[in-house]
Structures are given as structure tokens and as C-alpha cells.
Image (cartoon, rainbow, N blue to C red):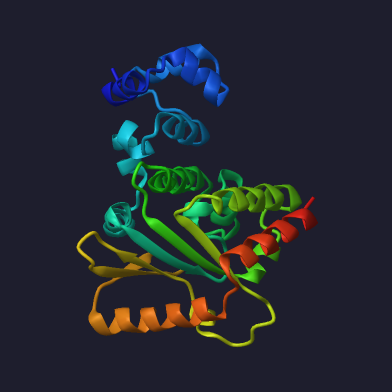
Amino acid sequence: MNDALRAALYATGQTTESLAERIGVDPKTTMRWLNEGRVPYPRHRAAAAEALGKDIADIWPDTFRKKVPLWFRPWQEIEREAVSLRSYQCMVLPGLLQTERYAREVLAGGGLLPRGEVERHVATRLARQGILNQDDPPQFTAVIDESVLRRPVGGPATMHEQLTALVRACGAPHVRVHVVPSSVGAYAGLNGPFVLAQSPDHRLAGYLDNQLQGQVVSEADELAAILAAWEDVRGEALSHRQSVDLITEVAQTWT
């Protein structure tokens, strides 16, 4: 039996039938999930975990571990334990805020991943998003370039869904999104994306992404450089409220 799923159902007072109703699947489907080795599709895993107030990795840990690339695992642990995350993206939305369709388009569009690997990476990305839905989530602040909102990743329907979901996410007290408007000229963000994580004991770690894999940064001088870049991009960005208004406005252009 999947004891983690069974325990989560018991703790929330739910049954496989009520869970099925909440996420829109047949009750026989959720009953099968109780069997060891039966793993839902990524979107159903995400919906079930959210309904049960758990991380996806808490309910299906082995599957999650197998889907995480070896080079990403050090950052995965840092990210999961962080009390705050500061993310800057100039090309796409942060992975923690991506919808399933948008994530699939981003991962497939580069042509670097074999077709069979795309779904594995999509599942990993969706599973990571559980940290924003847990009982004590990290404070998540994202700065994005306005061009991210206007790039037609997956087409109008995918972009409208993604930006609408982004506006909803911004309603959470622990999520803040700031947009650097296109009127800004050269600024530090043009040098590339990065993430800063702060641990419960106030230690900092950075993460840099590239075409092949990511790099965890912990040296003091490198962290100082990333912090300086963060101050620059944050200083050029709109306020959270202004950014939400802009995201809402751009979302309507994708209908």
C-alpha cells in the first residue's frame, strides 16, 4: 500500500471518493493510487497533493527522486529547506510559478531534451511547486523581465492560462512578483537568471542556470555579486501591485 497517501487521507478526513471528486477523476482511479507503484499523471499528483495539504514528494517520494537529475539534487534540497527564495528570470517564468502546459513548452522548445525526457522534467518541476503550498512556505519573491509576459510560449491559450495562474499566485501573502518594464534599458538582469535561497540559520546559497545544467554557488564573493545583481533588478522593477496590474493587462491580450 501507499502508506503516505493513506495517512494523508486519514489526516484530512478524506476518502478516495472525496479526493476523486475534488480533482475531477473517477473514484476507481484514486483507489488504484493506494496500491504501491501506481503513480498518477503529473497534473493529478499536483492536484491531489494540494487537496491533501502535502508536497508531492511526501506522497510519492521514490518517483520524485528518480525524476530529479543528479546535478539538480543539491539545489533541490536547498530549495525545499529555504525560508526565503529570490528569483530573477529574463527569458521565462520561474519554474515554481509555471503551469504544466507552459513548463512542457519551455522544456520541449529548446530541443535539448529527448521527447521521452520532457515529461520526466515536467513532473519534477510540478513537484517542486509543492513548497509554495505547504503549511509554512518560504517567502518567494520573483523579478521578471516584461518580455517574459509577451513571449508566445505555446501560443495564446497557453499564455493566457499561465498569466491568469500567475495573477492567482500573486494573491498569496508569501508570493511577490515584480516586473522590470520594457522601458528600462541595460540593467544587471541582462547578464542572466539566478536564484538566491536563505536557510533557516540565515545562510545564503545561489543558483545559476545554463543550457546544460545548473550550478550551486556558495562562495562569499560570488554570492556578493549575485546580491548586487538582485538589488539592481529589484530596483528597476515595478511594485508588486503595479506588476500584478500589468500581468493582468497582458493576460487579456492573449485571449
x%, y% of residue 72?
Answer: 33, 57
Residue 212 visible from this viewpoint:
no
**How far from the left and from the top, in percent, is residue 122?**
49, 46
Foreground of the two, 31 or 181: 181
Number of marks drawn: 0
Residue 138, how many percent across, how many down? Answer: 36, 54
* 240 lies left or right of 136: right
Q: Residue at x 39, y 34 (%)?
A: 53
In this rendering, the answer to whether 125 lies above or below 60 is below
From what the image shows, is residue 126 above or below residue 93? above
* Place of residue 62 in the rendered image (x, y in percent of width and height, measured from the top left): 29, 36
Residue projecting furthest to the bottom: 186
Q: Is residue 177 left or right of residue 223?
A: right
Quarter of the rendering containing residue 250: bottom right
Which image quadrant: the N terminus? Answer: top left
Q: Quadrant of residue 78?
A: bottom left
Residue for point 38% across, 62% down: 85
Q: Residue furthest left?
A: 201
Q: Is residue 31 above or below residue 247?
A: above
Task: State which quadrant residue 74 falls in.
Answer: bottom left
Q: Can see residue 217?
A: yes
Give the residue at x 57% y 63%: 92
